[in-house]
Image (tube, rainbow, N blue to C red):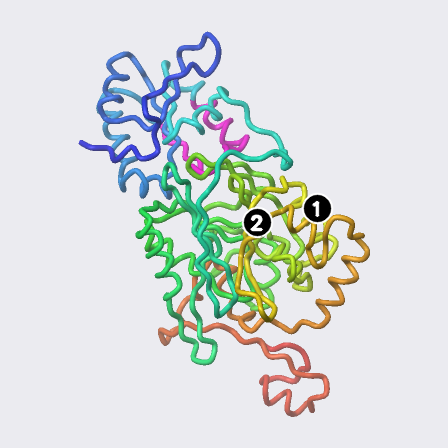
Amino acid sequence: MTLGPRLLTNDNIFTLQAKAGDASVQILGQPTEAQLKEFAAKGVKSVINLSCVAHEAGFLGFGVLAREKELVESLGVQYRNIPINPLNVPTAAEVKAVQDAVAALPKPVLVHCSNMERAAYATGHKPLPGKADLTKPLRGKPIVECIPHFETATCCFGVSCPETKLAMIVDPVMDFDQASGGIDYKHADSVVEHVKKNGLHVVLLLETHAHADHLTSMQYLKQKLGNPVTAIGYRITEVQKVFGTRFNIDEKEMPRNGSQWDWLIEPYQEWSLGNIQCVSIPTPGHTPACMCHVVGDAVFTGDTLFLSDIGTARCDFPGGSVEDMWESIQRLFSLPDATRAFVGHDYPPQGRQFSWETTIGKAKAGEKMVKIGTKKEDFIAMRRARDATLGAPRLLLPSIQVNIRAGRLPEPENNGTVYLKLPVTIKSSAPAAAAAAACGKVTTGTCG
């Protein structure tokens, strides 16, 4: 019986005492069948596996957890699976769950995960990190390739660890023709081709926020790329509540709890992409759920910070805040100047090509709206004045309905057709009879 390829394991098996003088708890990376048998023969009484079915079953081989459980129990050893997201540091609750299990199970106990790191945190061998120090460089230099979607001026990124080939996709795009209601996956297929061409294994599909100018292809890519983890900032629930109500979406069809994603990222949460150290920074302002993600020497700014001749994103969407945007920019400016910054959109002025990369140092020195020396009140005035001139994004209504569902379309209606809603606002100058005829009721508000 083969448990599956050891893609995330250490070169050699590691066993460490979780606490000084305590040989009854050992930790290691993903074990092979032979190693599990060897540990059972040496007297191990219990095995705790921290692998997450949603991610590692597809990564180590589908069904690996069930086969490991069957093997361990056939050896007379107790087995427990306490899933912890493989991309992030365990939460305090997850650590407690593991340590409670260790205390309750027969000793010696073997605690393992794919790369031993979660096991080290969960058993107390490695202390949980505090709030990240953004002024210090993180470990690693990812390979970053932009896969632009020119129709929506979106910068979608393929990001990978050069040593392990583990990768993530940032802000993927679904092609949508508003006039016909037609959906296509040409851009998403180009992402799949990029992954195959470079021999990458995608472990994460990451949204910087719920976009209002394009539809995400997250669910399509989840199916095409082996069930990677889907993730977004934890405050997406606030966005769901606002727009779920605005579009009159039934809560049974779309719960406002973020459950549409595998992982809701907490502020300053630390995680890893292969050998690359990562941390997520809360950057509300454009929307409440915006987060920027530092991946080694790079940061993905989403719609928070654009290239220096463009400025920042607008702040006039529901839940947006110019004051919050100011604070978020200050957090980004605390990163090392050499940090590569990859923006979520580009709207190049005449004479400049579409681009997507700058550095924090360049932004601090020359950002159009906010740079070192800009006063907060001046930025607020400039941003509000600019927002007052902006119309609604072309794909605002379809984008929001799909994106607050993590890229899923609404359920088909009884005729088998999927519909996106178009709320209609009756202008106050419209005659009451015309309004009644248009809406089916006498109103001068929004009918949807």
Dot 2, how many residues are within 10 Å of its Cα: few (below 14), some (14-19), or many (20+)?
many
Q: Which residues are magenta?
A: 80-101
* Label 2, label 1: how far apart the Cα atoms are: 14 Å
Of badges 2 and 1, nearer the viewer stands 2
The residue indicated by pointer 1 is: 330
Secondary structure at badge 2 equals: strand
Tell me the amino acid under the disc marked 1.
Answer: Gln
Tell me what residue is drawn at x 50 percent, y 28 percent: 95
Q: Is residue 157 above or below residue 331?
A: below
- Where residue 225 appears, x then y in whole percent? 34, 51
Of 193 and 80, nearer the camera is 193
| Residue 332 in the image, given as x and y percentages of width and height | 65, 46
Q: Is residue 299 above or below residue 422?
A: above
Of residues 258 and 323, the one drawn nearer to the viewer in this rendering? 323
Q: Residue 341: give its label.
A: 2
Q: Report whether 144 appears left or right of 376.
A: left
Residue lying at 60% horizontally and 79% vertically, measured from the top left = 424
Is 220 placed above or below 360 here? below
Quadrant in the picture for the C terminus: bottom right
> Mark 1, residues whose alpha carbon is within 10 Å: few (<14), some, or many (≥20)?
some
Instruction: Specify the quadrant of the image occupied by residue 312.
Output: bottom right
- The image shows residue 339, relative to residue 248, as above or below, that is above
